[in-house]
Image (cartoon, rainbow, N blue to C red):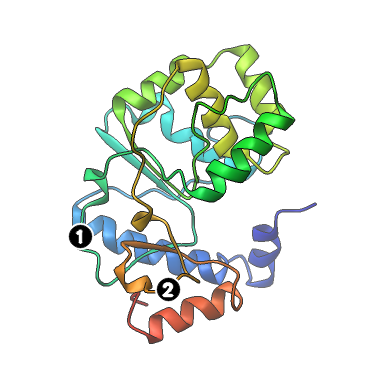
Amino acid sequence: MRPKVIEEMEQRGGKLPFIVEKSVANIQRYAEKLGAEYKLLDGEPFQKGLRAQCQKCAAINEEYDEYDTVVVLDTDKFVTTTCTENVFEARGIAPFDDVHRNRQLPDFCREFPRLGNPEYPLWSGAIYVMPRDFRQLMRAQINDSMRKVFELISPRPYVDEGIFHVLCHKAKFKLDKYLDEKWDYSSYLPNPEKANMIHIRHRPKGRDENYIDLVKAGIIEE
């Protein structure tokens, strides 16, 4: 199956899909406000042959070691107009919400019993806030055998989340507290104005319509 984003780009004459275009502009403004550099990842910067979502793991590549903290966001994320916090100061790497804790992680462990471990997180991969020591620890777990594991995970729905799970398992990395869910607040939940970042979902309407409703409500800036 061809990636949906490619089909949308062709329909839009080579332009990014609407929601991606709006998200990029929103996050760029936020980065500029914080004095941070912004980069839109494309291609296969992490490992050739893996699905697009897995390429987010490129943030642990050595080329980013000059940065104290790297933040990775999906391209359907938006900073709210009420957010006054600096995401680079947030702690906990990524959210570990109930869906991932109670459904996704058990599913992964059943499908990959030799790779999964319920004692280690399988995060929501829409946002990662990764300090240098964590990125280097994850990178240190990668060898040829691990890259073959990534190839097994890539076709499955776990993508980057599954990759980081097996890296954390191998590194014996876990925390008592993970990233606050106010940095990954689903757009259909109540009181979105209390969030720092909203993750635009496909309900109750399509993503484009949900985005427009949030703009009209003054919760995110167009």
For residue 152, side relative to residue 79 (left or right)? right
Residue 149 found in image quarter: top right
Say what secondary structure mark 2 lies in.
Answer: loop
For residue 117, side relative to residue 90 (left or right)? right
Image quarter of the C terminus: bottom left
Residue 22 found in image quarter: bottom left
Q: Amino acid at mark 1?
A: Lys
Residue 60 versus residue 12 in the image, above or below: above
According to the image, label 2 marks what residue? Answer: 190
In the image, 156 versus 121, the foreground residue is: 121
Residue 219 in picture, x, y percent from top left = 34, 77
| Residue at 53% over, 36% down | 122
Q: Amino acid at mark 2?
A: Pro
| Residue at 37% over, 85% down | 217
Q: Residue furthest bottom?
A: 216
Neighbour class for label 1 at 10 Å: few (<14), some, many (≥20)?
few
For residue 12, side relative to residue 88 (left or right)? right
Residue 184 in picture, x, y percent from top left = 41, 56
Circle on res. 216? none
Marks 2/1: CA–CA distance: 27 Å
According to the image, label 1 marks what residue? Answer: 33
Q: Which comes before the other along the chain, label 2 or label 1?
A: 1
Asked if residue 43 can be seen in this view, the reply is no
Neighbour class for label 2 at 10 Å: few (<14), some, many (≥20)?
few
Q: Nearer the viewer, mark 2 or mark 1?
A: 2
